[in-house]
Image (tube, rainbow, N blue to C red):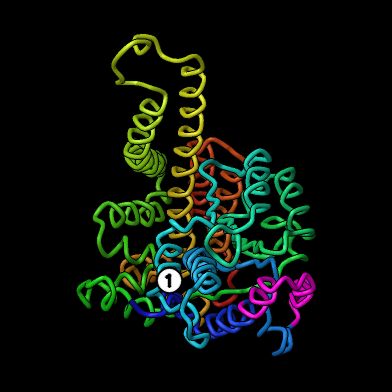
Amino acid sequence: MTNVFDRMIGQAPIADELRSAARAARGVAARLDEGDAGAVSMFAPSDDPNGDTMAGAVRASMTHAWLFTGPPGSGRSVAATCFAAALQCQSPDVGDVGCGECRACVTVMAQTHADVRHVVPQGLSLSVLEARDVVQAAARRPGTGRWQIVIVEDADRLTEQAANALLKAVEEPPSRTVFLLCAPSVDPDDISVTLRSRCRHIALGTPAVADIERVLIDRDGIDPQRAAWAAGVCGGHVGRARRLATDDEARAQREKALGLARAAARDSTAYAAAEALVRSAEDAAKAISAELDESETEEMKTALGAGGTGKGTARPPRGTAGALKELEKRQKSRSTRVQRDMLDRALVDLAALFRDALVISVGAQVAAMHPDKTDDIAVPMAGYAAPEQLLRCVEAVLDCRTALDVNVKPKFAVDAMVATIGLALNDRRRVDAGR
C-alpha cells in the first residue's frame, strides 16, 4: 500500500502541509508520554479567521482543531481521514509518516481504529444529543494510539445547539484530543464563526480533470475512454466520476436532470419531466435506504433478543418497541437526506448546463461543465435564449436548491423551478444590443 496521502487526489500542497503537521505532532506526543504537561503549549494557534496565509513555521506545526473545507467531491473527509492515519501512524521512520502499511494506518483508513471516531450525520442535521456524545468520546484518553481523534463529516449540518456543545470541547480540549471538522466552506451558513475561529483552516480545491481521469484508470481499472468522459462531466467530484463511469442508474439520473432544460421550455412536457426527476430521486433513495434499513433492523432485533430460545424468549424485552421505533425514525430521516442529496446533485448538473449555454452566449472562453452536451443542448440553447434569460434559469435552479434546504417539499420546489425556467426561456423581451 502507498502512503495514505496519495489518496488525496490533486491536493499535493495540502498533503505536504498535513504531513509536516503530523511530524510535529509526534514531538508533542513524545513529550506528553514523558509527563511534560507543558507540551500542549507546543500546539500552534489557529490561523487568522479571515483566512490570511500562515507562516511556514506555523504550517509545519500542530494544533488541536482543524477545519477542512472544499467543494463537494474535493475530498474533505478523505483528507481528514488521511491526516488522522498520519497522526496515529506507527512507522518508526518519522519521514514516512502516514506509511499506509502499519496497523494504525490500515485501521484508520478502514474506519475501525478504536481511537478515531467518525461522526457522520445520518439525517438532515446533527443534533445536540449527538454532539454531546461526541464531546464525551473526545474526553477519553486514547487506548492504543497517540491521540483521541474525532472526525466530524458534514459539520455544516450541526444545529446551533450542537455547534455550541461542540465549541466548548474545542475551546478546552483534553491534551490528547484532536478535532477534525469538514464543511463546504467557512461561510457562517456552513460553520459558525466562533467554531471556525478555533480551528486551523485547510482549504481544498477541485481536482483537475486529468488527475481524476488518472485515478479512474490506474486505481479503479476503468476503460480509458469511459474514464475520460466521466472525469470531464463530473464537475470535479471524484466519487461522482466513479459512479458515472460504473453505474448505469447514475448516468440515467444525469440524463433526466439535463433533459429538464429542454422539457421546461414547453408546458406540455415541463411538469411531467419535473415529476419524473423527483420520482427518480425518491426511488433511488428508497433502494439505497432499504438495503441499509434491513440489516440495521435485523441487528437491532437480534441485540434485543429476537430469535432466542429458552425461558423468557417468548415475550420481547421491555423497551423493545421504543427502540425499534427510534430506529425507524432515524432511518426515515436518513432516507429523506439521501433523497435530498440526490436531487441536489441533479440540480447542480442542471445549473451547470444553463451555465454552459450562458458562457457560449456571451462568448466566454472557459471549459464546459458538460462538454458532451455542448453541441446537442448548450449551443442551441445559447442561440435560442439571451444571456439575461439564461441567467434567470440559473437563478431559478439555485432558488430551488435553497428551497430544499429549508425543507420545502421537493415536488413543490421543482415545480416552481420549471415554471420559472419556462417563463424565462419563453420571454421574448430580449435586451441584447447585439441582436
Q: Is residue 383 magenta?
A: no
Split into 4 quadrants, where in the image is the N terminus? bottom left
Q: Position of residue 120 (x, y in %)?
A: 53, 50
Report the front residue among 343 and 95: 95
Q: Position of residue 72 (x, y in %)?
A: 50, 63
Report the front residue among 29 and 237: 29
- Is residue 272 visible to us here? no
Q: Is residue 220 left or right of residue 271?
A: left
- SS class, disc 1: loop
Report the front residue among 431 and 155: 155
In the image, residue 174 sits, relative to residue 370, either above or below, namely above
Q: Is residue 151 left or right of residue 243?
A: right
Quarter of the figure with residue 141: bottom right
Residue that label 1 marks: 369
Q: Is residue 43 magenta?
A: yes
**Which residues, given as a range, are shown in magenta?**
26-52
In the image, residue 16 sits, relative to residue 266, either above or below, namely below
Residue shown at 59% from the left, 82% from the top: 23
Residue shown at 63% from the left, 74% from the top: 202
Q: Position of residue 57 (x, y in %)?
A: 71, 89
At label 1, which amino acid type do we have? Met
Q: Is residue 80 left or right of residue 301?
A: right
Residue shown at 69% from the left, 74% from the top: 34
In the image, residue 376 sits, relative to residue 319, either above or below, namely below
